[in-house]
Image (cartoon, rainbow, N blue to C red):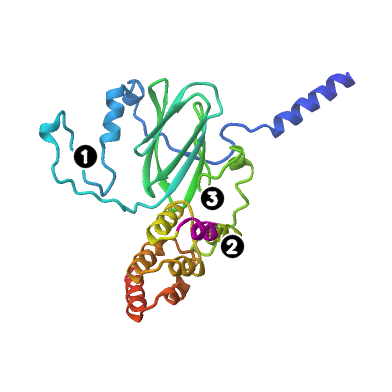
């Protein structure tokens, strides 16, 4: 009897530590209709989803041959829709397809990571072997990662949303749920996102050693801008590393969106040789 009681206590203890579906997070309403859930999504229908333009984009014209080719396309290289990420876990067995905005991922691992998403209202749809089983709308915040759990019998749960500290910088998937980097929200400018001094100095020294000309330096800086934020002092050093004032000014304007302490941006003007450039930069940022 004693052995039975001890075994029962052990099982109860294990159960108490196990995650139970629907016991954590906020349940997000299923917006998929009964008709949609009974219809398999064909490859053609999936392609239609990708052809839908993002909010604010020019629709992409469809053509079958060169006769309809656009001769003078209007390219926009630096569209700013914000940056957000969505991490979704489906812990049960099966082959699921997840669609977030204009991105789609299908696998049987139960791990779905979406990067480079626009901030704002973004639809998410989940399919089981081609059949829609769940749809809702996410409200994505700029420079934030949304973490979700999905259970077919329970629904989609929003566990939390965290400021992005290091984009694409994960070694252990479970860290997202168990200990999300220990981030502490900053004071409005995501101070935790800025490169630490050691990392910045390593990047800066590497750039100066490997690139003698402005174009090479600017290429490295713009690549780093895709994944990093900077302090005003760091931006001053980067701008100062550029030789010509016109290129300094262009860099100082473009990198402003990556600054975590914009109230101190005036220190960047120390990098310029001409007063006219200093004045133009401050006039530019004052209008943003």
Q: Which residue is mark 1?
A: 60
Give the spatial CA distance, label 3 vs label 1: 33 Å
Label 2 secondary element: helix
Tell me which label, 2 or 3, sits earlier in the chain. Answer: 3
Residue at the disc numbered 3 = 166
Q: Secondary structure at mark 3?
A: loop
Could one spot residue 83 in this view of the protein? Answer: yes
Residue 130 within the segment the image draws in magenta: no
Q: For the magenta stretch, what is the residue range? A: 203-211
Front label number (2 vs 3) = 2
Which residue is nearer to you in this view: 3 or 207? 207
Badge 3 local density, few (<14 within 10 Å), some, or many (20+)? some
Q: Estimate the x, y position of residue 244 in percent, counting from the top left.
A: 36, 69
- Are the two marked residues, 3 and 1, in contact with CB atoms closer than 8 angstroms? no
Q: What residue lies at 41% left-to-right and 50% top-to-bottom?
A: 83
Residue 39 is situated, as x and y percent measured from the top left of the image, at 32, 21
* Name of the residue lying farthest toward the left: 67
The residues bearing labels 2 and 3 have C-alpha atoms spaced at a distance of 15 Å
Outermost residue on the bottom side: it is: 275
Local crowd size for mark 2, using a 10 Å CA cut-off: few (<14), some (14–19), many (≥20): few
Q: Nearer the viewer, residue 201 or 96?
A: 201
The residue sitting at 76% across, 31% down in the picture is: 13
Earlier in the chain: of badge 2 and badge 1, it is 1
Could you say which is closer to the camera, residue 37 or residue 248?
248
Residue picked out by circle 2? 197
Q: Is residue 116 above or below residue 133?
A: below
Name the residue at 58% across, 42% down: 176
| Quarter the N terminus occupies | top right
Q: Quadrant of residue 133?
A: top left
Outermost residue, right direction?
2
The main secondary structure of the magenta stretch is helix
Q: In the visual, does 187 lie left or right of 218?
A: right
């Amino acid at each position: 009897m004693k052995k039975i009681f001890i075994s029962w206590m052990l099982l109860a203890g294990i159960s108490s530590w196990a995650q139970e579906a629907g016991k954590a997070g906020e349940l997000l309403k299923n917006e998929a209709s009964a008709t949609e859930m009974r219809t398999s999504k064909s490859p053609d229908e999936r392609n239609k989803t990708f052809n839908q333009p993002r909010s604010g984009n020019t629709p992409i014209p469809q053509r079958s041959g060169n006769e309809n080719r656009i001769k003078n396309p209007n390219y926009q290289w630096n569209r700013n829709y914000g940056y957000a990420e969505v991490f979704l876990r489906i812990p049960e067995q099966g082959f699921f397809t997840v669609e977030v905005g204009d991105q789609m991922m299908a696998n049987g691992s139960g791990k779905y990571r979406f990067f480079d998403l626009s901030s704002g209202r973004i639809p998410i749809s989940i399919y089981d072997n081609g059949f829609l089983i769940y749809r809702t709308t996410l409200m994505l915040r700029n420079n934030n990662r949304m973490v979700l759990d999905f259970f077919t019998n329970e629904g989609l749960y929003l566990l939390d949303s965290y400021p992005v500290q290091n984009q694409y910088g994960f070694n252990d998937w479970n860290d997202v749920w168990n200990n999300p980097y220990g981030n502490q929200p900053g004071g409005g400018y995501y101070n935790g996102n800025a490169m630490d001094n050691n990392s910045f100095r390593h990047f800066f020294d590497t750039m100066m050693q490997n690139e003698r000309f402005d174009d090479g330096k600017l290429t490295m800086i713009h690549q780093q801008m895709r994944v990093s934020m900077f302090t005003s002092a760091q931006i001053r050093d980067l701008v100062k590393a550029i030789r010509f004032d016109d290129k300094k000014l262009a860099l100082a304007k473009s990198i402003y969106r990556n600054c975590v302490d914009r109230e101190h941006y005036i220190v960047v003007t120390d990098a310029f040789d001409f007063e006219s450039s200093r004045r133009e930069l401050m006039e530019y940022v004052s209008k943003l």
